[in-house]
Image (spheres, rainbow, N blue to C red):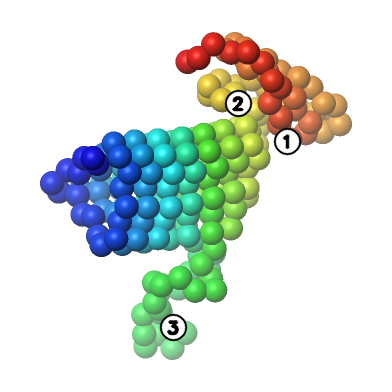
Amino acid sequence: MPRIHPTAIIESNVQLGEGTSVWDNAHIRHDAVLGEQCLVGGKSTIAYDVKIGNRVKINSNAYICNGVTIEDGVMISAGTIFTNDRFPRATTPDLKELRSSDPDEHTLATVVREGATIGAGCIVGCNLEIGRWAMIGMGSIVTKSVPDFCLAIGTPARVIGVVCRCGEPVHRFSDADNSTPVEATCQCGRAYSINSHVVTEIETTVAAQ
């Protein structure tokens, strides 16, 4: 059964998988779906219709808006904010009505692929993809998609290297990487082929961790 703190707000038609925990003052809006063994930290907000996979860790004070999909094994660190509208306005042009918060043609989707990590205090734009096992450094502002296994930092975030499935950096990009494929091996034994920003796992035998 899911574990829900008494101060959490869970709206109608929310699905929580087996073993998922929702902590103090978190708010999950209607029709959101969370898989098994997820963790939703205190004071985090998950908007309506958001889809979240299994074993996803969402730390405190995160905001995940409508239009975001998060796959299995993702880490969303404290204070992360997602967005879904590039040119938001509060009202109609004549200032006489509040604009609806319902999805419309301006609502743009974002996908965070399996195993990725988004560091503390990041802001993630919309109409983009965070790749498999990618890592975004703390405090970054993500305005473009980040490829699989890539490490991106800064404001705006730029790709500076490659990280392993285990989280350790395995390669730092240089100008020569644009034309010369390289291979890199992590201290855990996993190996990668790197061709510009295209990173491919090389099949290896690694002890279970």
**Disc 1 + disc 2, Cβ < 8 Å:** no
Mark 3 surroundings: few (<14), some (14-19) or many (≥20) residues within 10 A: few
**Disc 1 + disc 3, Cβ < 8 Å:** no
Q: Nearer the viewer, mark 1 or mark 3?
A: 1
Q: Secondary structure at mark 1?
A: loop
Q: Where is residue 51? Give x, y as percent.
A: 43, 52
Look at the image and tell me whether residue 121 can be seen. Answer: no
Q: Identify which residue is drawn at 58% across, 58% down.
A: 127
Q: Identify which residue is drawn at 44% across, 88% down.
A: 94
Q: Secondary structure at mark 2?
A: strand
Q: From the viewer's perspective, is residue 49 above or below residue 76?
A: below
> Which is nearer the N-term, disc 2 or disc 3?
3
Q: From the viewer's perspective, is residue 160 above or below residue 102?
A: above
Q: CA distance from mark 1 to mark 2?
A: 12 Å
Q: Which residue is mark 3?
A: 92
What is the three-letter code of the residue carrying label 1? His
Where residue 48 sits, quadrant-wise, is: bottom left
Where residue 203 sits, quadrant-wise, is: top right
> Which is nearer the N-term, disc 1 or disc 2?
2
Q: Nearer the viewer, mark 2 or mark 3?
A: 2
- Quadrant of the frame with the N terminus: top left
Look at the image and tell me whether residue 31 can be seen. Answer: yes
Q: Where is residue 96? Give x, y as percent.
A: 37, 88
Q: Secondary structure at mark 3?
A: loop
Q: Which residue is mark 1?
A: 197
Q: CA distance from mark 1 to mark 3?
A: 42 Å
Q: Which residue is mark 2?
A: 163
Towards the viewer: 89 or 151: 151
